[in-house]
């Protein structure tokens, strides 16, 4: 996987869906039939019989900010630590977009893919 991917699974366990996702993204799809969606909530849908994996464009849960810390589902990000260490820039998908926008960082690109601290 390339950073943070939001995966929704139907008729298969989460652990298996997360294990399959990197191969699917590399194009090594095996029996999985996949289709891309542009501009929707789901970036890629893959099916194998009744099993389905959706790679979501955005987090299905909201980010919660408290000071310089943002929690997204069961992950916590703190400005100046971990993947947010240093002065930036920080880019999607290395850091979830919801975290970067919650911290009110300055977008560096027109599409909002990379961010830096405000001056």
Image (cartoon, grey):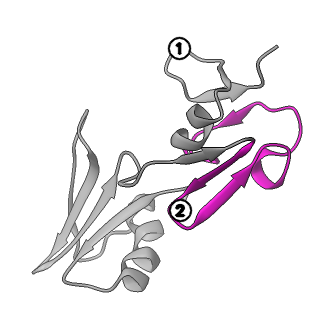
Q: Which residues are magenta?
A: 68-96
Of labels 1 and 2, the one closer to you: 1
Sequence-earlier tag: 1 or 2: 2
User: Of all residues shown, which one is farthest toward the right?
Assistant: 86
Q: Is residue 64 magenta?
A: no
Residue at 76% in and 30% down: 89
- Find residue 37 and report its horizontal and vertical position in percent: 22, 42
Q: Is residue 97 depicted above or below 113 in this figure?
A: below
Element assignment for label 1:
loop
Q: Is residue 50 depicted above or below 22 in this figure?
A: below
Element assignment for label 2:
loop
Left or right of 13 on screen, residue 2: right
**Rendered image quadrant of residue 30:** bottom left
Q: Is residue 72 magenta?
A: yes
Tell me the crowding category of disc 1: few under 14, some 14 to 19, or many 20 or more residues within 10 angstroms, Cα based: few
Pick the residue in front: 85 or 66. 66
Q: Is residue 102 depicted above or below 104 in this figure?
A: below
Per the model, the C-alpha gap separating discs 1 and 2 is 25 Å
Q: Is residue 65 depicted above or below 35 in this figure?
A: above
Residue at 43% in and 48% down: 62
Residue 58 bears which disc, if any? none
- Find residue 47 and report its horizontal and vertical position in percent: 17, 70
Which image quarter is the C terminus in?
Answer: top right
**Rendered image quadrant of residue 76:** bottom right
- Find residue 3 and report its horizontal and vertical position in percent: 59, 55
Circle 1 residue: 110
**Looking at the image, can residue 83 be seen?**
yes
Pick the residue in front: 2 or 110. 110
Circle 2 residue: 1
Residue at 22% in and 64% down: 46
């Amino acid at each position: 996987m390339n950073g943070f991917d939001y995966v929704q699974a139907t008729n298969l366990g989460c652990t298996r869906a997360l294990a399959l996702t990197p191969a699917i993204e590399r194009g090594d799809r095996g029996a999985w039939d996949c289709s891309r969606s542009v501009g929707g909530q789901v970036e890629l849908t893959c099916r194998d019989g009744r099993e389905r994996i959706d790679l979501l464009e955005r987090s299905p849960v909201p980010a919660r900010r408290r000071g310089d810390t943002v929690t997204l589902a069961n992950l916590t990000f703190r400005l100046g630590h971990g993947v947010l260490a240093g002065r930036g820039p920080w880019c999607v998908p290395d850091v979830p977009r919801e975290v970067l926008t919650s911290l009110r960082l300055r977008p560096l690109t027109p599409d909002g893919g990379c961010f830096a601290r405000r001056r």
